[in-house]
Image (tube, rainbow, N blue to C red):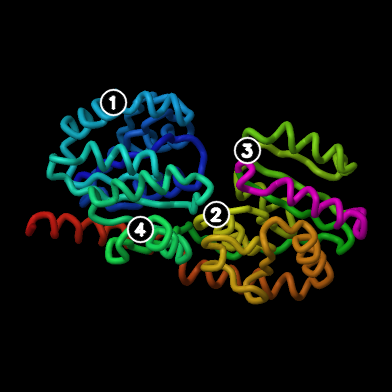
Amino acid sequence: MKVLHVIPSLGVGGTEKMLRELCRGLDRARFENTVVALKSGGKTADDLEASGVSVTTLNSPDGFLPGFVDQVRLYARLRACFEKERPQIVHTWLTRANVIGRLAGRGTGIPVVSSLRVMEAEKPYHLWAERLTQSACRCVTVNCSPLREFAVRKIGIPESKVVLIFNGIRIGPKPAGRATPEDSLTIGVMGRLHAQKGIDVFLAAAKTILDRRPKFQFLVGGDGPEKAALVRLAGTLGIGDRVQFLGTVPSEVFFSRIDVFALPSRWEGMPNVVLEAMAAAMPIAASRVGGVTDLISHDSEGLLFPPETPEALAEAVLKLARSRDLRQTYSEAAFQKVSQHFSLESMVRAHADLYESVLSSNRTS
């Protein structure tokens, strides 16, 4: 079965990572994957090509207005890709790809599977575009329970078309914890340095924590458009000497350097970084947003706090800092949960089953 995936870009991100792992994990004897990036390539494109997956980049511009103006050209080029590759299924990822992929697929007889990955209520034009074009796809996959509700209630996608497939991650042996002195723990956050991820909330919480635990250290992993502003904020808060911005760093290296992981996001789908933290057996304090609640039950696999509340994040971290036993209890529970319910193999298997079902339905319709 030939599957053509359409995605806005192939840089570094959670959706890009899941697409890469899906293409690598699907049985090559049963599935042939090709990928089209509407805008740009990047690290994920390089990774895919290195693993034998064909990648085409259409170089559509960034930004709402330039992208809107480019729609006619983009439609023609994507339609040409469909005609050249002749896939049996098209799988679109994220709103821009969902909309243009559905339109390009009309009249071809190729069934389209679409994917929503994050709740973007702050972008009403995304919801409008999803709503208007959803009839042109066979189903819409989501990666967490809250996003399923969002798709039905906020976008208006029929419940029967929404398919829940959790993100998955490779699970290795349970890592050993660090033997850090209790008064010198290192607290870490990792993600794209963008307003969504709430790194400013993390820094404000760090200020509160340092007032009570002055030897603590704070690491920020990742890069993005807000980096310069966040570095300035750390300086303004007077904590610049206690916060280190690492840039892009492998997750296994990052988690080996911290004692507690924090997720201060303002909104999420299912954050891969939390899956990675669970697989790294980290004690976790996370904002109660999106699919975080599928991963962590409060006071079971970690601690949850309301978004936009640096004081609540600070209290959660301080609670974890006070008890090594509590940190070990949460980290063990998190590792067991991710191992049992969120493996990469289960994610790949669910997509393979969906593709087979869609193709079978298309043959009989």
Answer above or below: position of 324 versus 223.
below
The residue sitting at 73% across, 31% down in the picture is: 228
Mark 1, secondary structure of its residue: helix
Marking on residue 72: 1
The residue under label 3 is: 248
Q: Give the mark toward the camera: 4 or 1.
A: 4
Q: Quadrant of residue 244?
A: top right
Q: Give the mark toward the camera: 2 or 3.
A: 2
Q: Position of residue 69 (x, y in %)?
A: 37, 24
Mark 4, secondary structure of its residue: loop
Indicate the amino acid at tag 3. Thr
Q: Position of residue 267 (x, y in %)?
A: 58, 54
Left or right, 320 with respect to 237, comes to left
Give whichever of discs 2 and 3 has the lower sequence position.
3
Magenta residues, start to end: 192-215
Give whichever of discs 1 and 2 has the lower sequence position.
1
Report the Cα–Cα distance between label 1 and label 3: 35 Å
Mark 2, secondary structure of its residue: loop
Marking on residue 346: none
Q: Are marks 4 and 1 in contact (CB under 8 Å)?
A: no
Q: Nearer the viewer, residue 336 or 212?
A: 212
Report the Cα–Cα distance between label 4 and label 1: 26 Å
Q: Residues within 10 Å of mark 3 (few under 14, many from 20)?
A: some
Indicate the amino acid at tag 1. Val
The residue under label 4 is: 156
Q: Position of residue 95 (x, y in %)?
A: 39, 44
Report the Cα–Cα distance between label 1 and label 2: 31 Å
Give whichever of discs 4 and 1 has the lower sequence position.
1
The residue under label 2 is: 268
